[in-house]
Amino acid sequence: MGDVISLIIDSIKSAASTIKNSSSRAKRGIFAGIAVIAIVASLSFTGARIAYKVNYSGHTIATVSSKKQFNDALQLVVDMVGDKDALNVVDKPIFNTAVVLGNDINDTQEVADAIINNTDAIVEATVLYVDGKEIARAESEMLSGVVNHRLNSFNVEGQECTSHFAQNVTTEQGYFMVSELDNVLEVQTVVSSLSVVTEMRQVTDVMVPYKSTVQKTNEQIVGYSAVTVTGVSGVNRVTQDVVMVNGEVQSCVDVNTEVVVAPVNEVVVKGTAKTLASAKQKQAAHAAGFIFPLPAGSWKVSSYYGDGRNHKGVDICAKSGTSIYAVADGKVVYSGWKGNYGNCVIIEHEDGMRTLYAHARQLCCSVGDTVSQGEVIALVGTTGQSTGNHLHFEVIVGGRNMDPSPYIGLD
Ligand SMILES: [Zn+2]
């Protein structure tokens, strides 16, 4: 610009020097004529030309070659916004004439962009389409915020999640009148109706319960039970691919299971023996010649001698009122209440051996009675320290409790 002006001044000076002898009036006319020619000549020589600076509120937004170009740009704005009303919101500019270089003139698209950038009522915004149909248009940042919030709303904290809409959702940028945009509530309403598919790589630690294994041993009495290895639960880290729609699980596929802590299985030893008597002890017991103290088929053993509870006899379940027989001939030395034993009979046999019958409902003999083998001496009950109808039977030799099982054929 400075170059153009200095060129013009030089032209005028040189013209003036050739006409200094002419009359003053003629001089002025010749001077003006030459000046115009010089300006036009110098403009076309340098490529400079007269143009308009488009002024909006005191600052230049673009340079146009003509007012027609500005009107063309306005038409472009209308096309870009897709709304004739756009013309009503664009400010009328002030056109300032200026001499500019051709390069300084904006093309029509640049002018249109400048108009939009300087018109508050027109903004760039995003249109949201579902299956090609527009469902919202809004300020881009707000719309993408609402969309992302919806997409992430079913993510599970601490898990790797990716999500997309079940529908075909696309967006497009464009220019719109501010008055044509949806507000945040309107956008939230339509976006919340979209279905979200969330794919999650889920890693969870799962407790693995220990198993219990039973080892049987005939070195312990039935009823004996002891934990020899304590069980410890394990932990598995399970990786799954989970697909959810709006937070509801649609599919769940195991990808990997890693043993973090292996479980330790519990080992329980259980006894199977009915008696721990030696062969010699059994032989001696059989030799005593006892019969079973209850009628055949009426009973079931619930607890054997020596099952770890310091149990001194054998418990034989039977219905209340079942006859209790003297296992051998003898003399009744006790018949009455005996603490935890409840109603109790003790018979002393020939060789000093004693048998004891406890928890009877009813006693059928008296101290001093002589009884025969098989004679009913009492009826089964649940008196004293007892949890059900049963006969508690003991064999006592020399004041010591023996295992009654081999005496009554339970071995
Ligand atoms: Zn008992």
Image (cartoon, rainbow, N blue to C red):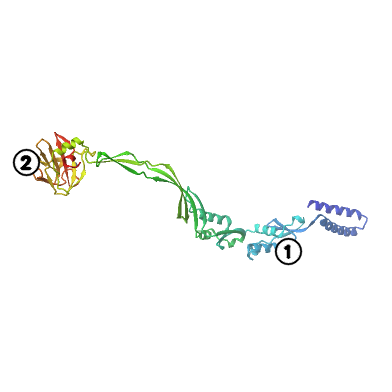
In x, y percent, where is residue 322? 14, 48
Mark 2 packing: few (<14 Cα in 10 Å), some, or many (20+)? Answer: some
Residue farthest bottom in this picture: 84
Picture quadrant of residue 326: top left
In x, y percent, where is residue 169? 55, 59
Judging by the rendered image, the residue that carries numbered circle 1 is: 68
| In front of the other: 18 or 390 | 390
Residue 350's tag is none
Picture quadrant of residue 392: top left
| In front of the other: 122 or 57 | 122
2 vs 1, front mark: 2
Quadrant of the frame with the C terminus: top left
Rendered view: 63 above or below 354: below
| In front of the other: 303 or 92 | 303
In x, y percent, where is residue 156? 47, 50
| Residue drawn at the location 18% of the way across and 40% of the way down | 406
| Residue drawn at the location 87% of the way across and 53% of the way down | 13
Spatial CA span between label 2 and label 1: 143 Å
Judging by the rendered image, the residue that carries numbered circle 2 is: 370
- Per the image, label 1 sits on a secondary structure element best described as helix
Query: Reading the chain from its start, which is encountered first: label 2 or label 1?
Result: 1
| Residue drawn at the location 71% of the way across and 60% of the way down | 108
Whether ligand 1 has any atom under 8 Å from the Cβ at mark 2 is answered as no
Mark 1 packing: few (<14 Cα in 10 Å), some, or many (20+)? Answer: few
Rendered view: 262 above or below 194: above
In the image, is 242 to the left or to the right of 272? Answer: right
